[in-house]
Amino acid sequence: MKLKLDENLPESLLPALSNLGHDVDNIRSENLIGREDSDVWQAAQNAGRLFITQDLDFSDIRRFAPGTHHGLILIRLRFPGRKALLEQVQKIFTTEQVTKWDRSFVLVTDLKIRVHSPDK
């Protein structure tokens, strides 16, 4: 899968997800740190990448409706430290069928994963 990580996710996710066979980059590598959310979002869409973030500005499912983009994973952990984020994302990408999340809006919490897939 082609993935783009937001600046609010640990760098250690790049090799962790790459080792699982994913094509991963982040906004740091494109010098997009501190840029407007719209610029970051557009970069992910232009590259055809599923975007992974903790930013609540991406939480409106009406604005980011399934099927209108390449995919969005919003991670909302109770205690989102680097280690917890790394562990949760690695767990998701090893236990879930993430390749089926293309064009979906996915909300990940400590207890649940809600996948909103595009209408077929």
Image: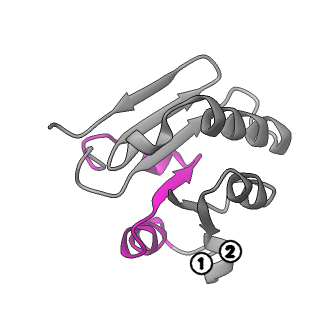
> Badge 2 local density, few (<14 within 10 Å), some, or many (20+)?
few
Q: Position of residue 29 (x, y in %)?
A: 67, 78
Left or right, 59 with respect to 113, comes to left
**Quadrant containing the C terminus in the rendered view:** top left
* Position of residue 44 measured from the top left corner of the image (x, y, whole percent): 45, 68
Residue 56 visible in image: yes
The amino acid type of the residue labelled 1 equals Leu
- Is residue 43 shown in magenta? yes
Q: Is residue 80 left or right of residue 50?
A: right
The answer to whether the residues at label 1 and label 2 have Cβ atoms under 8 Å apart is yes
Q: In the rendered structure, find residue 32 and report the number of the disc placed on it.
A: 1
Which residue position holds label 2? 28
Label 1 Cα crowd, 10 Å radius (few <14 / some 14-19 / many 20+): some
* Residue 59 visible in image: no
Residue range corresponding to the magenta coloring: 36-63
Query: 96 and 12: which one is in front?
Result: 96
User: Toward which corner of the image does residue 28 lie, by quadrant?
Assistant: bottom right
Q: Amino acid at mark 2?
A: Arg
Q: Position of residue 52 (x, y in %)?
A: 55, 51
Q: Secondary structure at mark 2?
A: helix
Q: Is residue 111 above or below residue 13?
A: above
Q: Relative to 88, does residue 104 appear above or below in the rendering?
A: below
Q: Residue at left 39%, top 30%?
A: 115
Residue nearer the viewer, 76 or 21: 21
